[in-house]
Image: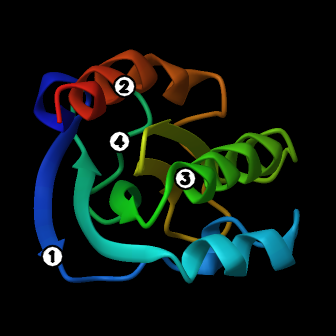
Amino acid sequence: MTGEDTYETGTVQIDTDLPPVWLGGVDDAALFRALAGVRACASVHGALLPRHPAYRDRLTHGIIIFLAELRDDAQAASLERIAAAKSASGDDIARAGVRHGKLFCLLIAKSFIVGVAPAETAQSVQRFVPRIAAILQAH
């Protein structure tokens, strides 16, 4: 999915965690209850491609996509709700959360250099949502 857009795929990690830092501060009690139900998680890291206007180098802007399987649908729905609220908070991290059944995907796009404006916004990362939803529904 990232290769079709403005990011190139970097590292892929399996047997990883969904760090609470990306969703904290909205409803932490619900967040930690839901995260306790994560059965498996993987992540894909990508770097902004040079064709993007905000490109500076491979390390400045990036994307992280977490895919988690939870014990039940309610936990995935809780994470999706928290991700939507966090996305609307207006911080400088663009995020989108998508779920299907017990599967939850969190997309994070940000600048990894302090003082450098992000290449994405909460609105711009929504272009990934239909593709993520289709992938989740296929599995």
Task: Name the kind of residue labelled 1 in the image.
Answer: Ile
N-term mark: 2 or 4: 4
All told, the count of numbered labels is 4
Task: Name the kind of residue labelled 3 in the image.
Answer: Ala
Q: In this orientation, which residue lies closer to the viewer: 39 or 135?
A: 39
On residue 76, the disc is 3
| Distance Cα–Cα, label 3 vs label 4 | 33 Å
Q: Secondary structure at mark 3?
A: helix
Task: Name the kind of residue labelled 2 in the image.
Answer: Ala
> Which numbered disc, 3 or 4, marks the residue closer to the eye?
3
To which residue does mark 2 refer?
133
Residue 16 relative to residue 4: left or right: right
N-term mark: 1 or 3: 1
- Percent position of residue 20, x then y: 62, 78
To which residue does mark 1 refer?
14
> Which numbered disc, 2 or 4, marks the residue closer to the eye?
2
Give the quarter of the image for residue 16. Answer: bottom left
Question: How many neighbours does mark 3 have within 10 angstroms: few (below 14), some (14-19), or many (20 or more)?
Answer: many
The N terminus lies in quadrant: top left
Residue 53 relative to residue 33: left or right: left
Task: Name the kind of residue labelled 4 in the image.
Answer: Tyr
Q: Are marks 2 and 4 in contact (CB under 8 Å)?
A: no
| Distance Cα–Cα, label 1 vs label 2 | 20 Å
- Percent position of residue 126, x then y: 53, 22
Give the quarter of the image for residue 48. Answer: top left
User: Which residue: 28% across, 56% down?
Assistant: 57
N-term mark: 3 or 4: 4
Question: How many neighbours does mark 1 have within 10 angstroms: few (below 14), some (14-19), or many (20 or more)?
Answer: few
| Distance Cα–Cα, label 2 vs label 3 | 13 Å
